[in-house]
Amino acid sequence: MDMREKQPEPLAREDGMFLVRPSGSSPGDFALSVAEGGQVLHLQVHRHREDAFFSVDGGPVVHGLEELVYQSSQEGGAPWGQPLGRPCPGGGPPPADTRRHGRTNLLHRATRQGDLVVVNELLRVGYATEAKDEQGHTAVHLACLAGHTELLAALLAAGAAPSGPDICGRHPLHYACEWPDAEMVKELLSAGASAQARDADNGWVPLHVAAARGHLDVVRALLDHGAPARPRTLRHELPADLAAQGKHTDCVHLLETYERPAPTYTRTSWLHPPHVDRECATRLLSTAEEGTFLLRRGRRSSYVLSLAGPTSIYHFEIHSQVWCIVLSKLIYPHNGDGLASIPTNVTWFVEKNVCTGPIHCSMLGRVDEPPPVAPRSLTSQRQTPTMTAVISRDSLSLGQTLGEGEYGSVLQGVWLTSEGTEVSVAVKKLREVSASEGFAREAELMVDLRHPCIVRLLAICLGPPLMMVQELLPLGSLLGYLQQGCGPVSLEEDVPRWAHQVACGMAYLQARRFVHRDLAARNLLLASRMQVKISDFGLSRALTLGSDYYRATTGGRWPLKWYAPESVNFGTFSHASDAWSFGITLWEMYTLGELPYGSLTGVQVLALVERGERLAQPDDCPDWAYTAMKHCWRFCPDERPPFSDLAVLFAAHSSRHLCAGCDDNAH
């Protein structure tokens, strides 16, 4: 809602003054009222699915109501224009279940200590069960972490939520599966916990955890509850694979011999007759819940997948050769059946939600091996399609050149979507036909990436020329922002936040076994001062299973000043060499865009590094941050920190994301 009122009191007296209140029209949502120019702007704060994810009128999705308010108070952080200023007097802290994280309270301490008497007394007097500690753990998380079954049962009986991610993206059921006793798992499942909740870092569902630990009773409890037996991690691993790695033969046998229940639907449920055109499909899906789909024949004797999204109906033409990978991203039931591969006999394909109706089909064609599941993006725009489509050249209008990429130029453009919405985009346009293989490889990598700290690929245009359509980040590269003084930069707040976001994005790539190979400030783009994203995957490579590094066999221009010594000497690239580049990138941030090593050549830099010398500590760079840089620049790759550790480190120094004055009360 966007409604202005004339001079309401007392909010309109001061620009930026705001208040947040529960929505009167949409339970679970909130309303944000902010004063601007003597009037009051009322905005809907929409709550997304489970846990505390919020967006304002279709803006970026943010984890935590307090984080949303903080970001909206920063210059450029409020999509509607006027940053939030002073809160209207008379308010209080946000409810515990709306926060990303909070402070340890009495219930947290008693749960950690296993004190059932104190926990029961706190629950008896109505102590809030959804309050979170500094790591985003509720009391249910903590009970599962400590293995306290009785405490967990008491919390669930008092109405505590059985699901919800902590700041690491893990749910209570993940932690319960770390223990051999299946009772905690049964308690959570009985209370409604999802057996398909995924760890945001590695794509593990609880069954992966139980199988990796060899907990046979837990594996059996999950399967008996209906958990898919063959879901894949971000590294394509099945639960049976993880059990085999741990030599848990009993778990392997159970998982490999488990008989899947009979499917609910056949293809007669989802393939519709020729008379169902685009208009009819849109009408059928307009009132369906998100995820409902149907297949129909298109205008050019091909097939079209129509899918109900969060706010729009998407229509994807099915291509049978080069871009059939796109179809596999859309149809393969990652979170439904947990199938190991696309079935050769599609007549028993199962999907959670379908539009029923008669069908006629014999030519669905081959679909490639499915990719791993990507975590849900937290920064997607409501008006921007969230799935990669193949689009026509006519739907793109190209504007000014923004820069030059590895395989072509990058232009600003406008994409007219199938719903008639104009979306501002960045278009990467292939320069030469000879570069099509590398360009296609970059597109293939990006098509599978869904993370709030990674630039998203929205669509592909087959051209000619071949083009990738990506989200447009209005502030451009971080390097340009730093060097040109495009806006204020706080070394205490902005740099740790950017470093945390980059580390999170790189940890996501590491979990998916991608090596970036070109991490630098020039390849980081700013959506706003509050959000940086990783871009330019022209040099990126996917590691093969069983290998922890990639060896480059072709030449080209390499950014040697950002490269680890083993990359320069032997052409080997790994997550550890990306960590070295992260250290250089961090140095760029703290120097506001200075060139690493000044005028030294690549050969001179390598000699300096091999003598044990490193870049000097930048002025005003805190000691802890420079220590992190030096850890990234350790000569031995195995001694460099993983990105998950770096993300935790910089999160700890980004505490000012929390609103000042948000006190964590019990009730």
Image (tube, rainbow, N blue to C red):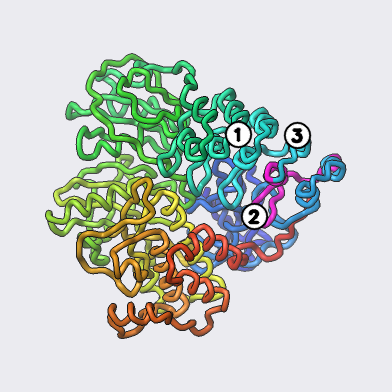
Please state which amino acid type lies under the numbered disc 1: His
Residue 274 appears in which quarter of the rendering? top left
- What's the distance in space between the residues labelled 1 and 2, CA to CA? 26 Å
Q: Position of residue 376 (x, y in %)?
A: 47, 45
Span colored in magenta = 124-145
Position of residue 23 measured from the top left corner of the image (x, y, whole percent): 63, 45
Is residue 468 rendered to the left or right of residue 626?
Answer: left
Residue 303 horizontal/vertical position (percent): 25, 28
- The residue labelled by disc 3 is 153
The residue tagged 1 is: 215
Q: Answer with left or right where residue 564 lies relative to residue 274.
A: right
User: From the viewer's perspective, is the residue at label 1 or at label 2 nearer?
Assistant: 1
Q: CA distance from mark 2 to mark 3?
A: 22 Å
**Is 165 colored magenta in this rendering?**
no
Q: Which mark is residue 389?
A: none
Residue toward you, 248 or 383: 248
Mark before the other along the chain sequence, 2 or 3 = 2
